[in-house]
Amino acid sequence: MPVSTIPTEVVIHPLVLLSVVDHYNRVARNTKKRVVGILLGQWQGGKVNVANIPFEEDEKDPSVWFLDHNYHESMYEMFKKINAKEKMIGWYHSGPKLRASDLEINDLFKRYNPNPVLVIINVKPTDLGIPTDSYFAVEDIHDDGTATTKTFNNVPSSIEAEEAEEIGVEHLLRDIKDTSVGTLSTQITEQLNSLKSLFSKLTEIKTYLDHVHEGNLPINHSIIYNLQDIFNLLPNLEVDMVKKSFATVANDEHLVIYLASIVRAVLALHNLIENKLVNREVEKKREGEDKIEKKDEKEKVEDNDEKGKGKEDKR
């Protein structure tokens, strides 16, 4: 794929996310600073690796920044000795949003790639969904004939992993996974998070359409076409066959839930009766032991009385 074209999607691997989080925790943890690094990978296949580079930025004046590109060039030469197929395809920073100096930094990276990709990786995500945003710098042509300006164009991004990466990520997640939480609870939590993410996306679509309807935003036909495709993919719930299928599945699930509730109630009653029987046997056993102890004490008292009488008779 030529480097001068813009891809339709940017594929990011989990190792990239882990490397960026590690970079942030080592350099800018508990601060307002952001970290910047290089993305190495291939245009075909979507494999992306990370090499960190020193970066300094003035917190008060975002236009003042320093990027050690000499360090980047030396690191890139070492990376080429390990894997010559990987090229410098772009750069990343920890965001969480675009900044005014990003276009200037992007121009610096054009020394190594005519059209570098910018990936913003939010190391502290607050919203549900993928914590990455991908951008390419494009020339924005104005209809009024004024000079063109540079801006970032958003490109869809996804997170994919190869088999070896999946195994490594699973081993890492075992260390942070709460083993006390059951599988059912985990599944319900994941479904709930998915529904929350879907709700946030629908809310975002509604907000956009409201702004377009009120005239605050211009009509973007590509977005409208995509929304129409989404609506076309929705099933027609007014068909009798679909209604019957949904009703059948719902009835089957409710039947399973009903039977499970009955079984659970029966088991609870069985355990309750069994506990009462065990407690009754324990009480009987304790009563028998108490009677034996009282009998032994009575015999001891009688023996002591007889011994006392015997001593008095001898006197």
Image: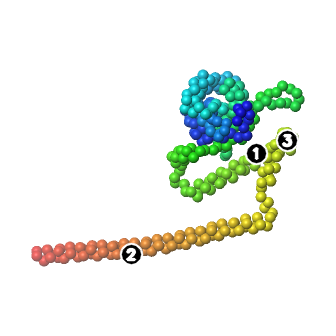
Which residue, given by chain and number where applicable, does mark 2 sit on?
A: 284
What separation in Å lies between label 3 and label 2 (alpha carbons)? 85 Å
In this rendered view, identify the residue nearer to me: 242 or 76: 76
Amino acid of disc 2: Lys
Residue 204 is labelled as: 1
- Mark earlier in primary sequence (1, 3): 1
The Cα–Cα distance between marks 1 and 3, rounded to whole angstroms, is 16 Å
Query: Where is residue 136 shown, x and y percent of the image?
Result: 73, 33
The quarter in which the N terminus is drawn is top right
SS class of the residue under badge 3?
loop
Q: Is residue 306 above or below residue 247?
A: below
Name the residue beneath numbered marker 3. Answer: 219
* Res 122 seen here: no
What amino acid type should be assigned to the residue bearing mark 3? Ile
Give residue 132's quadrant in the image: top right
Q: Residues within 10 Å of mark 1 (few under 14, many from 20)?
A: few
In the image, what residue occupies the spot 53% across and 72% down? Answer: 269
| Relative to 247, residue 175 above or below | above
